[in-house]
Image (cartoon, helix red, strand yellow):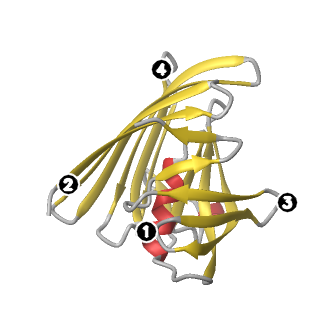
Amino acid sequence: MEKSITAIWKGWDGDSTEYLTLREHGGIIFAESVIISESGGRQFAARYRIECDSGWRVRSVSVSLFGEPRGIRLSSDGRGEWTDGSIQLHNLKGAIDVDIFPTPFTNTIPIRRLNLGAGQSADITAAYITFPEMSVTADPQRYTCIEPLETYRFESLDSDFTCDIEVDKDGLVVSYPGLFRRVI
C-alpha cells in the first residue's frame, strides 16, 4: 500500500512551525520534516528523517540543524539495540521508539506501534533527542489509550509531566495542549 500525508503544526504559543511529509511505501514508513523554532531565546531551523518498519519500529533516524555541520544519525534493530555508525549505544538499550523535541510527530510512533485498546497503557523507553542541543538520552514514558485513535495520555516517567493528546485516524497529533496544534 502506498500512502502520503502532509501535516503542519504550530507551537501552542506560536514560537514554532513544523512541516512534515509521512509516506508509507513497500512496508516502510518514512517521515521527513523541517522545524523552525525558538528555544531559550535561540532561533533555529532543523530537519529530521525517521524510517520505521511496517510495525512502526524505528529503524533509523537522522537529525541536523541548518547552518551547523554536526548531526545525529542513529540506526536501530527495532528491538532496542542502537548504533551510531559502528558504535553501539548502550545508554539507549531497550528503546524501541524515538522522541524528538520539539515535534508532536514522534508521539505517533508509539501510538501506532502499541495499538492500545481503550483503558490500556504501556511503559516504553524512547531515544530522546532535543533541538537545538542535539543531545540523545534514554527517556522512560507511558502511553495510555483513552479512546483508540482519538485521545491518548502521555506521561513522562522521570518527571511530573502529563498531557492528554488528541490524534486523528492516522494517529497524527491534532492537539497537544500547551505545546502544539495541527493547522493542516
Task: State whether residue 130 is above or below residue 164.
Answer: above
Please name the residue that numbered disc 2 is placed on.
3
Please name the residue that numbered disc 3 is placed on.
160
Q: Secondary structure under badge 4?
A: loop
Task: For marks 4 and 3, give the CA distance.
Answer: 32 Å
Q: Of the residues shown, which amino acid type is indicated by label 1?
A: Arg
Label 3 vs 2, first from the N-terminus: 2
The answer to which of 35 and 165 lies nearer the viewer is: 165
- Horizontal relation, residue 86 to residue 5: left or right: right
Q: Residues within 10 Å of mark 4 (few under 14, many from 20)?
A: some
Q: Position of residue 30 (x, y in %)?
A: 30, 51
Q: Position of residue 15 (x, y in %)?
A: 64, 24
Please name the residue that numbered disc 4 is placed on.
66
Label 2 vs 1, first from the N-terminus: 2
Task: For marks 2 and 4, give the CA distance.
Answer: 28 Å
Label 4 vs 1, first from the N-terminus: 4
- Horizontal relation, residue 11 to residue 39: left or right: left
Label 1 vs 3, first from the N-terminus: 1
Q: Secondary structure under badge 2?
A: strand
Q: Of the residues shown, which amino acid type is indicated by label 4?
A: Phe
Q: Residue at x 61, y 57 (%)?
A: 165
Q: Quadrant of the N terminus?
A: bottom left
Q: Of the residues shown, which amino acid type is indicated by label 3?
A: Asp
Q: Label for residue 112?
A: 1
